[in-house]
Image (cartoon, rainbow, N blue to C red):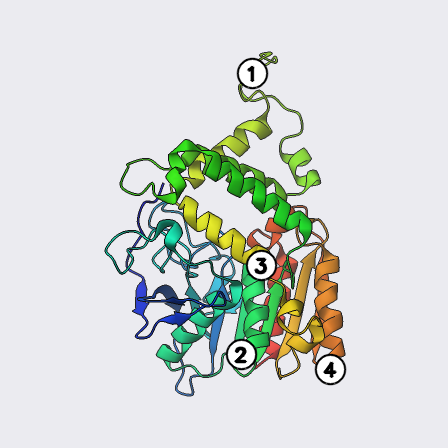
C-alpha cells in the first residue's frame, strides 16, 4: 500500500496560490503531477487534455513506476495512433486527492504531517480547477480537445460547463453527468470496507508500516465487478474451477472468478492509497452537473461553443447508454453540435480501456474533424 505520494520522473507543478474548493475551504501547497507527449506547436492550439478515471493516473504512455506496466492508454495515445502525438500535444494530470504525485490525503500537510482525514473533501469541479491551473502554467489558453472516459468523462463535462472557453472539442466516453443511487451505493460498500478494517486507524495509518490493505482489497473487488459485463465474466470464467478438478467444500477460491477478483484486490493495494480511494469516490458521488447549474442540465452548457461527442457501450451497466443520451439531449437543448454513438463490445464499462477498434475510429475521426 502506498503510504506517501509516489514521485517519479513526471513533471510536477506546485501552485503558487491555494486552490479554492467547492466545500468552502482552500487547499494550500497544491502539487500537480502530469505527463506530456508530443510537441506543443507555435500557436499553442494543438493541445489535448486527457483526464483519467478513478484509479488511474497521469502515466498515460509511460510505464507505471510501481507496477512497471505500460501507460494506461498507450493503445490510444502515441505516434500514428487515434490521439496522434505527431499532431497533438497530449497532457494528462493526476487528479488532486490521488496518490501518484498530486496533492492528496497521503501528502504532507502544512504542519509536516500527512494530511490523512484532515484533507478537505473535494469535488470533480475542484479537480478541474487544478487542471485549469496547470493549463495556465503551461500557457495554453484553449485546448484543441478534452477527452475522458468514466470519471475522466465527468472531468471533461465539468471543464466544458465551468470553463467553456478552454476547449474547442469535448469527447466523453462511458460516462455520466451525475452519479446515480446505484453508483453511490457501490462506492459506499467500498468505503465501509476500508473504514471497517482495524488497520485504517481513522485514516491515520501512515507511518505504521501497514494500512487497511484488506479493506481496500475488498473495495477494489466490489468495484471491479461493476467494470465488467456478465457476458464477459461468463465467457472468461464461467463456473470453471481454479486449479482443481473438484470443489473443496470450503471457502478457498474454488472458482476462477473468485481467484481473479482476489488477485485484482490484492494487486491494487500495492499501487493505491486507501484514503485516496475514499476521497475520490466521494467526489464522484457528489458529481451532479445539473444540480450545479440550477437543476437543468442544458444550463450547464449554455456558455459553451465546443463540439461534443458522446460514446457509450452496450454492455456497460455502470454508466449505461441512457446516461450518455441524457447528456446528448441536454446539449441538443442548448443548441450545441453533438454526435453520439453506442458501440458494441463484450467488456462492459472497461471497454474504453481495451481493444475496441470501433472506438479508435470514433476518437480519431472526431478529433480530426475538430481541426
- Nearer to us of marks 3 and 1 is 3
CB of mark 3 within 8 Å of CB of mark 1?
no
- Number of residues whose C-alpha sits closer than 10 Å to that of mark 2, classed few (under 14), some (14–19) or many (20 or more): some
Q: Earlier in the sequence, mark 2 or mark 4?
A: 2
Residue at 72 percent of width and 70 percent of height: 328
Task: Determine crowd level at label 1: few under 14, some 14-19, many 20+ residues with C-alpha closer than 10 A.
Answer: few
Of the pair 347 and 279, the residue shown nearer to us:
279
**Do the CB atoms of the residues marked 2 and 4 lie less than 8 Å apart?**
no
Q: Confirm or deny contact between disc 4 and disc 3 (CB under 8 A).
A: no
Q: Which residue is mark 4?
A: 335
Residue 244 is labelled as 1
Q: Tell me where residue 212 appears, x and y as whole percent.
A: 41, 36
Q: Give the residue at mark 2.
A: 163
Report the front residue among 261 and 182.
Answer: 182
- Foreground: disc 4 or disc 3: 3
Q: Name the residue: 50% across, 31% down.
A: 262
Mark 4 burial class by Cα count in 10 Å: few <14, some 14-19, many 20+: some
Dot 3 lies on which element?
Answer: helix
Mark 3 or 1, nearer chain start: 1
- Give the alpha-carbon distance from disc 3 to disc 1, as whole Å: 45 Å
Which of pointers 2 and 4 indicates the residue nearer the eye? Answer: 2
- Give the SS element for disc 4: loop
Amino acid at each position: 500500500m502506498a503510504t506517501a505520494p509516489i514521485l517519479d520522473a513526471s513533471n510536477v507543478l506546485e501552485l503558487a496560490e491555494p486552490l479554492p474548493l467547492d466545500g468552502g475551504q482552500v487547499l494550500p501547497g497544491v502539487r500537480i503531477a502530469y505527463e506530456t507527449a508530443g510537441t506543443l506547436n507555435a500557436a499553442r492550439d494543438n493541445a489535448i487534455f486527457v483526464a483519467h478515471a478513478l484509479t488511474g493516473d497521469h502515466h498515460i504512455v509511460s510505464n507505471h513506476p510501481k507496477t512497471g506496466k505500460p501507460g494506461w492508454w498507450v493503445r490510444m495515445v502515441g505516434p500514428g495512433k487515434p490521439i496522434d502525438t505527431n499532431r497533438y500535444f497530449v497532457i494528462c494530470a493526476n487528479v488532486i486527492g490521488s496518490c501518484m504525485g498530486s496533492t492528496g490525503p497521503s501528502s504532507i500537510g502544512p504542519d509536516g504531517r500527512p494530511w490523512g482525514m484532515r484533507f478537505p473533501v473535494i469535488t470533480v469541479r475542484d479537480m478541474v480547477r487544478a487542471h485549469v491551473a496547470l493549463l495556465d502554467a503551461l500557457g495554453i489558453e484553449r485546448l484543441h480537445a478534452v477527452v475522458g472516459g468514466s470519471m475522466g468523462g465527468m472531468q471533461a463535462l465539468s471543464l466544458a460547463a465551468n470553463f467553456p472557453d478552454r476547449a474547442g472539442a469535448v469527447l466523453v466516453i462511458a460516462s455520466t453527468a451525475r452519479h446515480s443511487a446505484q453508483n453511490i451505493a457501490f462506492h459506499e460498500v467500498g468505503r465501509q470496507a476500508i473504514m471497517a478494517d482495524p488497520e485504517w486507524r481513522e485514516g491515520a495509518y501512515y507511518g505504521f508500516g501497514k494500512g487497511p490493505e484488506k479493506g481496500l482489497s475488498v473495495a477494489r473487488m466490489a468495484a471491479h465487478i461493476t467494470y465488467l459485463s456478465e457476458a464477459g465474466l461468463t465467457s472468461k470464467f464461467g463456473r470453471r474451477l481454479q486449479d482443481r478438478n473438484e470443489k473443496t467444500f470450503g471457502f478457498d477460491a474454488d472458482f476462477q472468478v473468485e481467484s481473479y477478483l482476489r488477485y485484482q484486490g490484492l494487486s491494487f493495494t500495492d499501487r493505491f492509497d486507501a484514503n485516496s480511494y475514499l476521497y475520490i469516490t466521494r467526489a464522484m458521488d457528489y458529481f451532479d452537473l445539473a444540480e450545479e447549474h440550477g437543476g437543468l442540465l442544458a444550463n450547464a452548457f449554455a456558455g459553451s461553443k465546443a463540439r461534443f461527442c458522446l460514446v457509450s457501450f452496450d454492455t456497460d451497466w455502470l454508466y449505461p447508454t441512457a446516461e450518455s443520451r441524457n447528456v446528448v439531449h441536454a446539449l441538443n437543448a442548448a443548441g450545441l453540435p453533438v454526435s453520439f454513438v453506442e458501440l458494441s463490445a463484450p467488456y462492459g464499462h472497461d471497454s474504453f480501456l481495451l481493444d475496441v477498434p470501433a472506438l479508435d475510429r470514433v476518437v480519431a475521426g472526431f478529433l480530426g474533424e475538430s481541426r
